[in-house]
Amino acid sequence: MSEENTDWGKSVAGVVLRDGKVLLTRHTYGAGKGRLIIPGGYLQNGESPETALRREFLEETGVEVKPVGMLGVRFNMHDRYVIFLAEYVGGEARSDHDENSEVIWLETEKALTAEDVPDLSKKLIRAAVNGSVMPIVEYEHSEKYAPTSLYCTGFDGERSTK
């Protein structure tokens, strides 16, 4: 990704669970250096969060994913950060040898107790395992507004257990 096309104020990450394991990357820089974290990255200018998640996963891990819901969101004075639950679609986990030094499928229970997995990643993994997700709901909209997805607890007001 070219730096001039990067929207440094918007980022995404995702939790992907498969066969009792979670996909994690060992970060190579910044505050997460040397730690196993959920994959993610910054949006490109004009890119939707869902598209950014798909792109970032493929670039950094070699794994194709499909966002299915939202696990969390952070808004502060510096950035907006959306964390998705995503389904595994295909591909083999591999490092990009740039932003991460390894990509692994780690047993979920081990990830929740590992010292090299940060607390935020653990909280999001736990939310995914517990089904604390707001699913994507399609809706009719005006072309004036984008994107065309909405995350909510459902039409009946019940919390999602998806």
Image (tube, rainbow, N blue to C red):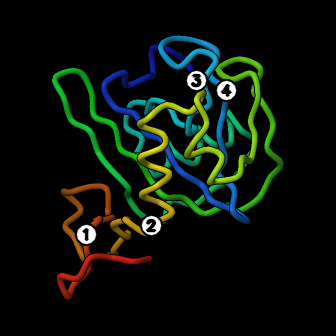
- Residue 66 x/y as whole percent: 57, 60
Label 2 neighbourhood size at 10 Å, few (<14), some (14-19), many (20+)? few
Name the residue: 33% across, 50% down.
72
Which amino acid type is shown beneath numbered disc 4?
Arg
Asked whether 129 or 65 is in front, the reply is: 129
Which amino acid type is shown beneath numbered disc 3?
Met
Can you tell which of label 4 and label 2 is closer to the viewer?
2
Q: Is residue 13 above or below residue 150?
A: above
Residue 8 location, quadrant:
top left
- Where disc 3 sits, the SS reads loop
Q: Which residue is mark 1?
A: 152
- Residue 24 x/y as whole percent: 65, 40
Label 1 neighbourhood size at 10 Å, few (<14), some (14-19), many (20+)? some
**Mark 3 or 2 closer to N-term?**
3
* Disc 3 from disc 2: Cα separation: 34 Å
- Residue 9 x/y as whole percent: 30, 25
* Disc 3 from disc 1: Cα separation: 31 Å
- Residue 12 x/y as whole percent: 43, 39
* Disc 4 from disc 3: Cα separation: 20 Å
Asked whether 127 or 15 is in front, the reply is: 127
Disc on res. 26:
4
Asked whether 11 or 15 is in front, the reply is: 15
**Mark 3 or 1 closer to N-term?**
3
Q: Which residue is mark 2?
A: 130
Which amino acid type is shown beneath numbered disc 1?
Cys
**Mark 1 or 2 closer to N-term?**
2
